[in-house]
Image (cartoon, grey):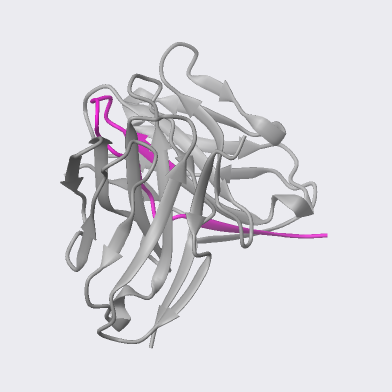
Amino acid sequence: AQSVSQHNHHVILSEAASLELGCNYSYGGTVNLFWYVQYPGQHLQLLLKYFSGDPLVKGIKGFEAEFIKSKFSFNLRKPSVQWSDTAEYFCAVNINQAGTALIFGKGTTLSVSS
Amino acid sequence: DAGITQSPRYKITETGRQVTLMCHQTWSHSYMFWYRQDLGHGLRLIYYSAAADITDKGEVPDGYVVSRSKTENFPLTLESATRSQTSVYFCASRATSGPYEQYFGPGTRLTVT
């Protein structure tokens, strides 16, 4: 069965530090990839997505992610985090079939201290 | 632009009771989904629906029932609530064709005592 692995369960950073959250998936075919963010007490919001084309995708709030097909990875990055980035981050995969739901990783909690 | 709404936002119920969580979307999206979010498990799919009157099981369907008589509504029923069903439940929707981006509702926090 397809799965998504997020390597870091909890990441603690100081403001202005750089961020990289790992995400790997297990499926050899065409995939659509997503990063969602969940701020405390809120619902999931889409940060960015990859479907095709340039493997480096840019999302909202200065986030970006790089799709490396050979590594089955879609890592999330931000050069300089802010206190307001404190949230839970979920990587998700859709295996490009109509009707298939997203498969989520277990999430990474990011805590940013000011 | 209401988007996708869920009700109630918070619910406390007793073991054995029937509970229905409501989900409503205003985009006329064909697909709708129910997930539960638990610490250490991320989001797990309970049921999904491709259109009115078409539903299918996800990863964790046991103890849940869904229906979809209208495109815009996708209620989730716990027939006889158990403590293990204490969770936060998210409804989501997406359009028929790609991209396969899902839009999430605000969630319902359910506590079963």
Q: Which picture quadrant has residue A28? A: top left
| In the depicted structure, whether residue A13 falls above or below residue B101 | below
Q: Position of residue A42 (x, y in %)?
A: 60, 56
Q: Position of residue A8 (x, y in %)?
A: 48, 56
Q: Position of residue A70 (x, y in %)?
A: 32, 25
Q: Is residue B57 found left or right of B42 in the rendered image? A: left
Q: Which picture quadrant has residue A26? A: top left
Out of A50 and B36, give the one closest to the viewer: B36
Task: Identify which residue is drawn at 37% across, 45% down.
Answer: B73
| In the depicted structure, whether residue B96 falls above or below residue A85 | above
Q: Is residue B2 found left or right of A18 in the rendered image? A: left
Task: Identify which residue is drawn at 31% across, 26% down.
Answer: A31
Quarter holding the C terminus of chain A is bottom right
Q: Residue furthest top?
A: A53
State whether residue A67 appears in this view.
yes
Quarter holding the N terminus of chain A is top left
Residues in magenta, as a range: A91-114
Q: Is residue B34 found left or right of B25 in the rendered image? A: left
Q: Position of residue A86 (x, y in %)?
A: 68, 56
Q: Is residue B35 magenta?
A: no
Q: Which picture quadrant has residue B14? A: bottom left
